[in-house]
Image (spheres, grey):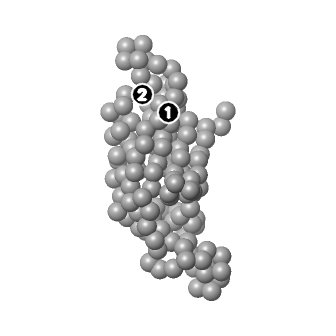
Amino acid sequence: MTLTRVVTFHARHRYYRAGWGDAENQRRFGPASEAPGHGHLYRVEVSVRGPLDAETQMVIDLALLDEILATEIVGRLDGQHLNEVVPPFATGEELPSCEALARWIWARVGVRLSGAARLERVRVAEDDTLWAECLASG
């Protein structure tokens, strides 16, 4: 059985590699490279898989899942500039793409799950036309 919860948050980001300079960043990323960055209403879908608990008939305690998502996603990212608050983006190690953000969220949420529930999917959408997914392997 799989259960999916959706959360949203507003945040800004900018695609910019410091070693490339303005002209190369503009050539590679276009307007997405311009300071101070641009904003999105991100939509994050988190799917959890597991057996139904015999007593509750749920895959996971929904209050627990909501608390994890509120703490690890919305509480950390809402109203923020992703280049500043997500460590690999802040150091320039990674660009704040949907793919990188989905992988970062997967790592934060996955370690917080308990019991038989396992993370199945994290989907991060910048808008209705662009999203990335991390999926459980096997």
The residue positioned 58% from the left and 52% from the top of the image is: 132
Q: What's the residue type where badge 2 is placed? A: Ile
Mark 1 touching mark 2, by CB under 8 A? yes
The residue positioned 62% from the left and 86% from the top of the image is: 23
Query: Could you tell me how far apart the alpha carbons at marks 1 and 2 are, in whole angstroms?
Result: 8 Å
User: Callout 2: 10 Å neighbours few (<14), some, many (20+)?
Assistant: many
* Quadrant housing the C terminus: top right
Disc on the earlier residue, 1 or 2: 1
Q: Which mark identifies residue 24?
A: none
The residue positioned 61% from the left and 81% from the top of the image is: 26
Q: Which residue is mark 1?
A: 48
Question: Relative to 93, is 41 on the left or the right?
Answer: left
- Which of the 4 quarters of the picture holds residue 65? top left
- Which of the 4 quarters of the picture holds residue 134? top right
Image coordinates of residue 33 in percent, x first then y, are 55, 77
Q: Secondary structure at mark 2?
A: loop
Can the viewer see residue 64 in this picture?
yes
Image coordinates of residue 127 in percent, x first then y, are 50, 57
Can the viewer see residue 20 in this picture?
no
- For this orientation, the residue located farthest to the front is 128
- Which of the 4 quarters of the picture holds residue 54? top left
- For this orientation, the residue located farthest to the top is 54
Q: Which residue is mark 2?
A: 60
- Which residue occupies the foreground of this view, 42 or 136? 42
Q: What's the residue type where badge 1 is placed? A: Val
**Numbered-mark total:** 2
Seen in the picture, residue 117 relative to 107 is either above or below; the reply is: above
User: Callout 1: 10 Å neighbours few (<14), some, many (20+)?
Assistant: many
- Which residue occupies the foreground of this view, 30 or 136? 30
Image coordinates of residue 12 in percent, x first then y, are 43, 67
The residue positioned 57% from the left and 66% from the top of the image is: 95
